[in-house]
């Protein structure tokens, strides 16, 4: 495969430590990592993997991942070089999979477009955030997506309207089909740039005030259980500050697990299991991880 990648001008590297590619700063080496810089190169990567019988793992900013300590076998496709954006007019934006959500929000602000402010500060990229329908502050990606450019597991391109994306709480149709989010068209509205900037600043201030951004983490560790808040249940069970190895329940926000230094994937998984056991015993509520284990 490496020879074919070279022929098509697609960058790649072997043995890349996943700890350098995840916000948790945890994870062993990836056997082979590909770096497409366009939708066309991503499509070529998917086709090459299909022809080779490989099922690639798609990596954005690694903000919701816990990668095992032994690393990942096979092919990892990083979308970090896919950062194209375009103002399409009438409140529409084209955004490629690797675009950081903060960059996306600033681009919207530059073009006086409102609706994406909730995503400012979510430490992810467009692709992964669409795949899991990420959200915060009463908004989620499905609120602003008009269409998603999907690449099938065999390499076919297809624009899916939002009604066909089966978005729900932290889920989408791509989780069932294995389709790859290559890009999306967003539908925003023209707004007052001063108000847009004020909302973005307020959201970032609230994040910095309430979340342990000073430590490596993977965002909210658990999904919100119906009728409850995961952080509240964890705090209620007196688990705030509990640690296993270098992994700790944040004392700033109990819904976050932080890497205090040298945490392993095994540490995090053990701490998650401990929290699940204690919370279920004491409250009857099972906490489902929001972090994806790979």
Image: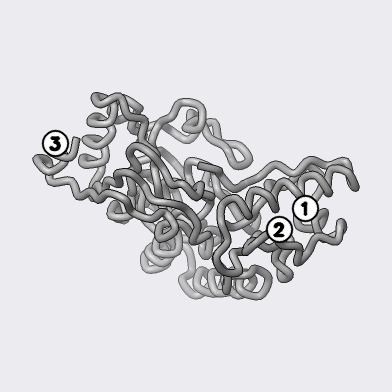
Which mark lies nearer to you, 1 or 2? 2
Q: Residue at x 34, y 37 (%)?
A: 74
> Circle 3 sits on which residue?
4
C-alpha gap between disc 3 and disc 2: 44 Å
Left or right: residue 288 compared with residue 152: right
SS at badge 1: loop
Does residue 57 lie above or below 232 as drawn?
above
Q: Residue at x 21, y 40 (%)?
A: 40
Residue 134 position within the rendered picture, expressed as x and y whole percent measured from the top left: 55, 49
Does residue 114 lie above or below 6 as drawn?
below
> Circle 1 sits on which residue?
229
C-alpha gap between disc 1 and disc 2: 8 Å
Closer to the camera, 38 or 148? 38
| Dot 1 and dot 2 residues touching (CB under 8 Å) | yes
SS at badge 3: helix
Does residue 140 lie above or below 146 as drawn?
below
The answer to whether residue 3 is visible is yes
**Quarter of the image that includes the N terminus:** top left
> Circle 2 sits on which residue?
255
Quadrant of the rendered image containing residue 167 = top right
Q: Residues within 10 Å of mark 2 (few under 14, many from 20)?
A: many
């Amino acid at each position: 495969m490496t020879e074919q990648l070279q022929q098509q001008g697609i960058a790649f590297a072997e043995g890349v430590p996943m700890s350098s590619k995840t916000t948790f700063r945890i994870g062993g080496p990836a056997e082979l990592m590909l770096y497409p810089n366009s939708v066309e190169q991503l499509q070529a990567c998917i086709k090459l993997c299909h022809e080779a019988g490989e099922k690639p793992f798609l990596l954005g900013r690694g903000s919701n991942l816990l990668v095992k300590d032994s690393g990942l076998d096979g092919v990892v496709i990083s979308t970090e070089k896919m950062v194209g954006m375009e103002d399409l007019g009438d409140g529409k934006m084209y955004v490629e999979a690797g675009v950081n959500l903060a960059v996306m929000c600033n681009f919207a602000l530059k073009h006086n477009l409102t609706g994406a402010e909730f995503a400012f500060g979510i430490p992810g990229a467009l692709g992964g955030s669409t795949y899991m329908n990420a959200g915060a502050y009463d908004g989620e990606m499905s609120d602003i997506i008009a269409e998603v450019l999907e690449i099938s597991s065999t390499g076919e391109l297809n624009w899916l309207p939002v009604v066909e994306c089966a978005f729900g709480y932290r889920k989408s149709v791509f989780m069932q089909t294995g389709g790859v989010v290559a890009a999306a068209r967003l539908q925003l509205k023209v707004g007052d740039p001063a108000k847009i900037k004020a909302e973005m600043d307020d959201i970032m201030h609230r994040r910095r005030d309430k979340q342990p951004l000073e430590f490596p983490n993977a965002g909210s560790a658990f999904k919100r259980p119906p009728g409850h808040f995961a952080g509240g249940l964890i705090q209620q069970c007196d688990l705030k500050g509990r640690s296993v190895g270098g992994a700790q329940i944040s004392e700033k926000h109990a819904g976050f697990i932080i890497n205090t230094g040298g945490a392993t994937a095994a540490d995090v998984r053990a701490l998650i299991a401990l929290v699940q056991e204690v919370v279920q015993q004491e409250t009857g509520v099972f906490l489902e991880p929001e972090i994806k284990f790979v």
